[in-house]
Structure formats: structure tokens, C-alpha cells
Image (cartoon, grey):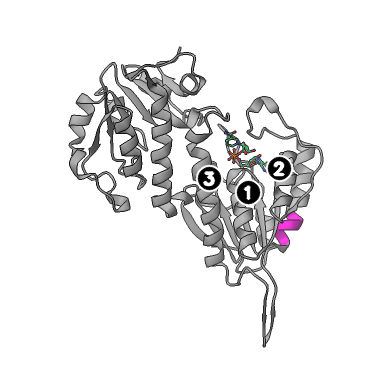
Amino acid sequence: MKIGFLRSPDDSRCPLSTMALTKFEKLGFEVHVERGLGTSIGISFPSIEVDRELILSTADIICSVSPIPEVIQGKARSNMIVVSFYQPYVPNFDSDQFSHVQAKIFSLDMIPRSTLAQSMDALSAMASLAGYKAVLLAAEKLPRLFPMMMTASGAIRPANVLILGAGVAGLQAIATARRLGARVEAFDVRSAVREEVKSLGAKFVEVEGATEDKAAGGYAVEQTEEYKRKQKEAIAASVKKADVVITTAQIRGRTAPILVTEDMIKAMSPGSVIIDMASSTGGNVELIEDKAEVIKHGVMLIGDSHLYLYAKRDASDLLANIFYNYVSQFIREGQIKIDEENPILTSSLIHPKA
Ligand code: NAD
């Protein structure tokens, strides 16, 4: 059994670690990596580095952090298994691009949000890192400190931090901002997170009448107009007193909801900072620009949905575990086998579709 790891020029994360390499070998794999894999995080795999072409022509399974162009160009063999991140849930995703592809393509971002699949949940792992980094970035940019501080020349009040969306990233952001000594408020349409928010020492912004759908698999769903109006009022009051706002609210497969309007930004104190982690899907903040830092009405707006890249070493180690945990699902009695009863594999197989 041969497995190969390819480089992704547009992503600095590495999908293999030395620890995962040992585990793959124990599982019975001969492992090859494309020359230079790991350079971006300062590691190398001297004895197993080969040319990309060799991997594409010999591996049974190929793994990559981002889609592999050669697969769509029809260069993947028919019995090959491709594992990467394809985001097939985005609205403009073109599934016809695979029509002539003979290999089987699995997208790691499609695994179910079940207890069994948790160790392969890359989105959650990256969201945790990003939530942490968002707070550090905001603390760096804010012309104030986060904690209350008593000095001989006077007292400094703690910074007010507002987190919108208390999923994986939001909860990590709350915990981090609290550790740094800020006063934290948080809001989410899922009332179930109220207790989690409170247990982290933050105040939950209450808005009644949210629509929740258990069938949505843990994801938020579209809300009524009446609810949106009440939510807007509550958020406006919290944004006005916030020094930092971090937004993480996403609805899978749809444009992110606007939660912070231009009027709300105008009401903030100059020097305040907003970090929008949903900017790649439209953003939660009016005037936000994805992958950019701009100042509007005296407020710094940062749009970045890939803040985990600031922790590329940890992100790589976690991804390596995730690729290992996922690929080991294919191994049955020492052989590669696609178990059609395994929901982790069936839900992440994006081509060919049953
Ligand atoms: P996400 O990235 O899809 O969204 C971030 C947060 O924004 C969510 O909490 C969502 O409810 C919230 N949100 C959406 N629209 C909003 C709006 N209009 N206003 C305010 N908030 C809004 O979510 P996520 O971080 O991936 O996690 C969602 C849930 O799924 C969490 O409860 C998480 O614990 C759960 N989860 C479970 C598993 C598992 O069981 N394996 C894995 C990952 C996440």
C-alpha cells in the first residue's frame, strides 16, 4: 500500500508530521512525500522525499491540504483515492469539474459532526486555533490593554470584548479573551451555548425567539425577520460599548449573516478593532474586506477566515493527525477497502456520487 503527500503552493500547512509518518508505516503504508513538503514549517522527510510525478503515478492514496490540479486534469489513476478539502458545500461549487475523473475523491470537510468522526474534524481543529489567534491579533491592534490595571497614576479599565457566534472558534475566543483579563460578552442564535458562554465567565446577550433545527447537524439555520430585528437591537447596544468585536457566525453553504452594520461601526470608539472570521463567505460585518485590514470611521476592520495559518506549526500537527485518523478508516485487515457502511467515508465521498 502506497500513500503520498503533495505540497500545496497556496497553503503553508503540512499534512504530515514525523509522528503521523511512523503511524502510517505501522499501518503498513509505504509513504512518499513531495520534495519540499514541510519546508514551510521547517521540517523535512529526507529519506522519503520524491518528485510529485512519481507520487501521482504510483500512490494508492494521495493526500493534500488543498485540491490537486492534476486530478481534475485527469492525471489521477482510476483506482486512486484522493483525500483533500474541496468545500463542495459552497454555492458556486462546480461538481461537473470531476465528470471525467476516474479516481475516487474524498473531501475531509464533509465528514459528519458525530462523536466517532471528531478526531478527523479539521474544521473544528482549525476553528479552535483561529479563535485563539483572533483574540491575540485584536489585543495587538487595540491601542488599549485587555486587563484592568491599577497603577500609581490611575486605574485602567478592562477592555470590552464582544464575540458574535459562539461555536468552536467563538468559545475559544471567549476563553482566550477572559484569560487576558477582558470583560467578555457573547451572542449566538443557538441558545444551547448560553451555559457554555457563562461557564467561561462571559455574559450571554439574550435575544428571544430563535429558530433552531436539530436536523441541521449542529449548524445554525436561517432566522425569521422579527428575530433578526430584535437581534440587531441587542447587538447594536453591545457593539457600541465594545473595544473589540470578533465575529465567527457562519451558515454552511450560504452567505454569512450581516450582524454588524455601518451604523454600529460609526457608534464605536475610535481605535476599536473588529475581526471578521466569516469574511471569506461574505462576512458578518458591513464594510469588511476579506484578507485585508482597513480603517473605517476610525475603527480597524480585519477580515480573515484563515487565522489558523498564524499557528501553521500546530495547524500542521493537527492536520497530520486528522489525515492519519481519516485514512485509517480505509484499512481493513491490512488492505485498502472503501467500506460502504462507514458513514464517515460515505458522507465525505464527493466523486463519484452514488
Ligand atoms: P459555525 O462555524 O458553523 O458557526 C459559528 C457559530 O456562529 C455557530 O455557533 C452558529 O450558531 C453561530 N451563528 C450562525 N448564525 C448566527 C447569527 N445570525 N447570529 C449569531 N450567531 C450565529 O459553527 P461551529 O463552530 O462549527 O459549531 C457549531 C456547533 O457544532 C457547535 O455546537 C459545536 O460544538 C458543534 N460541533 C460538533 C462537532 C462534533 O460533534 N463532532 C464538531 C464540530 C462542531
Q: Is residue 54 above or below residue 142?
A: above
In the figure, is residue 339 to the left or right of 19? right
Q: Earlier in the sequence, mark 2 or mark 1?
A: 1
Cα distance between the residues tagged 2 and 3: 16 Å
Look at the image and give the residue range highlighted in magenta. 236-240
Of helix, strand and loop, which one carries label 3?
Answer: helix
- Residue 17 horizontal/vertical position (percent): 34, 43
Residue occupying image coordinates x 39% and y 34%: 323
Number of residues whose C-alpha sits closer than 10 Å to that of mark 1, classed few (under 14), some (14–19) or many (20 or more): many
Number of residues whose C-alpha sits closer than 10 Å to that of mark 3, classed few (under 14), some (14–19) or many (20 or more): many
Residue bearing mark 3: 127
- The yes-or-no answer for disc 1 within 8 Å of ligand 1 is yes
Residue occupying image coordinates x 55% and y 43%: 282
Q: What's the amino acid at mark 3?
A: Ala
Residue bearing mark 1: 171
Q: What's the amino acid at mark 2?
A: Val
- The yes-or-no answer for disc 2 within 8 Å of ligand 1 is yes
- The yes-or-no answer for disc 3 within 8 Å of ligand 1 is yes
Judging depth in this view, the residue of 175 and 7 nearest the camera is 175
Q: Is residue 85 at least partly visible in the picture?
A: no
* Residues at discs 2 and 1 in contact (Cβ within 8 Å): yes
Q: Is residue 140 above or below residue 33?
A: below
Q: Earlier in the sequence, mark 1 or mark 3?
A: 3
Of helix, strand and loop, which one carries label 2?
Answer: helix
Could you say which quadrant of the image residue 57 lies in? top left
Residue bearing mark 2: 193
Cα distance between the residues tagged 1 and 3: 10 Å
